[in-house]
Image: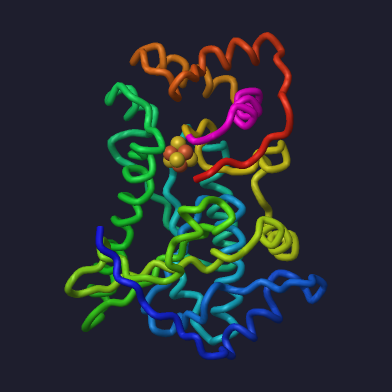
């Protein structure tokens, strides 16, 4: 997949200064946070804000809205897109993502894979996704997101847009999450989504943020976050993520016994363990026997 890099505006930006003063920290933090890079929203017809409903998406949404307001970019041109994973994600996630979008008065689009959810897909394929075969992400997130790009482009043309349609997709990925995410270019042309009549750039507005900055932003915003975090989960999205660790899976299992049963049924059916050498049936037996969490629930590399 070829992706060409776009140069960020390195000039000291009014935009960045404005955002620095107003975003998230209410003037009390020692380190202010802003959107990464002086990316001028005004060069885009539409700003697509990808939202999983999770903490990073939520902080990203807040900082982008504030940047839009500070620079006179119409909020009507910000569109929140949620790839709905259905029963495999934490209950209430889609509703929460919509609530967060509506809080800022933004258009909200939810989309899900029409052929069925991830569990249906795993049952058909006969194997679980893995770090080297993340069809969960490509089919249920990236692939669906691409459909929204096409939909919005068509809407614009139908409404009379002439010439190249310019879009930017914003992803709440952070460098702290993994070396892979740290190495990503903060703004680049997305060759997969761009066509002869539209350009789509990918921007990582909070790539440089720490998790503490994310939570400070959310706290200052007053917008509700998902209760899974209060239970101790470091991430949202799939309740049982194939990249997750034992402690997080154990915590998730304790709070989602029925979904765990559905996963175990698929595991039994396809005779392929959830992860190499790691069976959800064993996890379920342990949790049912009252097995306690061993140590803290830590985040995992994405
Ligand atoms: S949360 Fe985990 S299992 Fe779910 S789509 Fe992402 S990588 Fe795949």
Residue 174 position by quadrant: bottom right
The kind of secondary structure the magenta stretch mainly shows is helix
Comparing 109 with 242, the one in front is 242
Residue 292 horizontal/vertical position (percent): 73, 19
Residue 88 to residue 41: above or below: above
Quadrant that contains the N terminus? bottom left
Comparing 129 with 288, the one in front is 129
Judge left or right: residue 77 versus residue 16: left
Judge left or right: residue 30 versus residue 126: right
Colour theme:
rainbow
Q: Quadrant of ligand 1?
A: top left
Reply yes or no: does residue 252 show up in magenta. yes
Residue 163 horizontal/vertical position (percent): 21, 83
Which residue is pictured at 79% across the width and 70% down the height? 29
Using the rendered image of the protein, determine whether residue 90 is visible from the camera's viewpoint: yes
Which residue is pictured at 57% across the width and 36% down the height? 91
Q: Which residues are magenta?
A: 243-255
Residue 244 to residue 67: above or below: above
Which residue is pictured at 79% across the width and 72% down the height? 30
Reply yes or no: does residue 210 show up in magenta. no
């Amino acid at each position: 997949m070829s992706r060409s890099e776009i140069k960020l505006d390195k000039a000291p930006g009014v935009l960045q200064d404005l955002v620095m003063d107003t975003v998230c920290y209410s003037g009390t933090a020692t380190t202010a946070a802003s959107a990464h890079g002086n990316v001028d929203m005004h060069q885009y017809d539409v700003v697509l804000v990808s939202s999983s409903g999770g903490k990073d998406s939520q902080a990203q949404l807040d900082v982008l809205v504030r940047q839009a307001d500070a620079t006179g970019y119409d909020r009507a041109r910000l569109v929140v897109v949620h790839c709905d994973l259905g029963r495999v994600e934490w209950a209430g996630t889609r509703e929460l993502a919509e609530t967060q979008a509506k809080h800022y008065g933004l258009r909200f689009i939810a989309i899900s894979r029409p052929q069925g959810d991830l569990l249906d897909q795993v049952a058909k394929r006969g194997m679980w996704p893995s770090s080297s075969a993340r069809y969960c992400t490509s089919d249920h997130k990236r692939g669906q997101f691409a459909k929204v790009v096409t939909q919005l482009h068509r809407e614009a043309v139908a409404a009379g847009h002439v010439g190249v349609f310019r879009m930017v997709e914003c992803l709440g990925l952070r460098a702290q999450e993994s070396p892979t995410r740290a190495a990503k270019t903060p703004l680049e042309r997305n060759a997969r989504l761009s066509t002869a009549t539209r350009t789509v750039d990918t921007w990582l507005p909070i790539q440089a943020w720490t998790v503490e900055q994310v939570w400070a932003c959310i706290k200052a915003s007053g917008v509700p976050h998902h209760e899974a975090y209060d239970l101790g989960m470091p991430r949202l999205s799939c309740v049982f993520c194939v990249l997750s660790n034992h402690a997080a899976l154990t915590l998730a299992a304790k709070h989602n016994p029925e979904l765990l049963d559905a996963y175990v049924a698929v595991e039994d059916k396809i005779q392929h363990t959830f992860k190499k050498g790691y069976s959800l049936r064993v996890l379920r037996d342990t949790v049912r026997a009252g097995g306690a969490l061993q140590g803290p629930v830590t985040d995992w590399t994405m």
